Amino acid sequence: MTDLTKYNHDFEAERETKPKIAEGRHNMTFVGDEIIFGNNGWEAVKLTFEIEGTTLNVSYACTMAHDTSEKAVSIGIESLRKIANSLGVTGALKDPEKQFLGKKCSAELVVNDRGYLEIKSDFANTFRPVEKAAEKKPTKKEQIKAEADFVKKASSDIDDDFDDEIPF
């Protein structure tokens, strides 16, 4: 057992159940996978992603085996293909950890019933290639106003005491 009181630190640990980022589409980086097991011979590859700009991780499971549902397996295989495509991985998938590691994609995140963020469950249709921040181009009206403001400021900076005498 670790006793932190001997360090005389004044801190209080708080439990926060609400996500620190909003629902919506976010860029994510693949950070790992594992095989998980359940009832009826269910096996899935659980893919873990880190949400860009945070240290929060979210996971998505793709069914790879099931004793009573071939449909679940076919959905899992198709989901894994969609995720691979969104990460820019093509060809045979043999080891997601090696093939996906460090690659980026984007997905829609939603808050679940327990108040935590998760990847939207829609048969992996939410996965897309990384979305780059869109550069907002000014409208023609904004551009004209900006130019007028610049000219106005530049003309007000001219010194009224300007002497036209040329020294030569």
Image: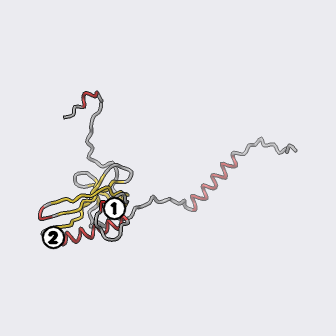
User: Which residue is nearer to you in this view: 79 or 16?
Assistant: 79
- Left-right relation of 121 to 151: left
The amino acid sitting under disc 2 is Ser
Where disc 2 sits, the SS reads loop
The image shows residue 141 at horizontal and vertical percentages of: 57, 60
User: Which residue is nearer to you in this view: 157 or 111?
Assistant: 111
- Mark 2–mark 1 Cα distance, whole angstroms, equals 27 Å
* Mark earlier in primary sequence (2, 1): 2
User: Mark 1: few, some, or many residues within 10 Å (few <14, many ≥20)?
Assistant: many
Query: What residue is drawn where x is 22% and y is 52%?
Result: 114
Query: What residue is drawn where x is 19% and y is 72%?
Result: 71
Q: Which mark is residue 100?
A: 1
The image shows residue 91 at horizontal and vertical percentages of: 34, 71
Say which quarter of the image contains residue 103.
Answer: bottom left
Query: What residue is drawn where x is 54% and y is 59%?
Result: 138
Say which quarter of the image contains residue 113.
Answer: bottom left
Query: What residue is drawn where x is 78% and y is 43%?
Result: 162
The image shows residue 83 at horizontal and vertical percentages of: 32, 65
Q: Which mark is residue 111?
A: none
Mark 2 and 1 residues: CB-CB less than 8 Å, in contact? no
**Does residue 78 sit above or below 160 in this rendering?**
below
The image shows residue 17 at horizontal and vertical percentages of: 26, 46
Say which quarter of the image contains residue 27.
Answer: bottom left
- Quarter of the N terminus within the rendering: top left
Where disc 1 sits, the SS reads helix
Q: Which residue is mark 2?
A: 69
- Left-right relation of 125 to 149: left
User: Mark 2: few, some, or many residues within 10 Å (few <14, many ≥20)?
Assistant: few
User: Which residue is nearer to you in this view: 135 or 72?
Assistant: 72
The amino acid sitting under disc 1 is Phe
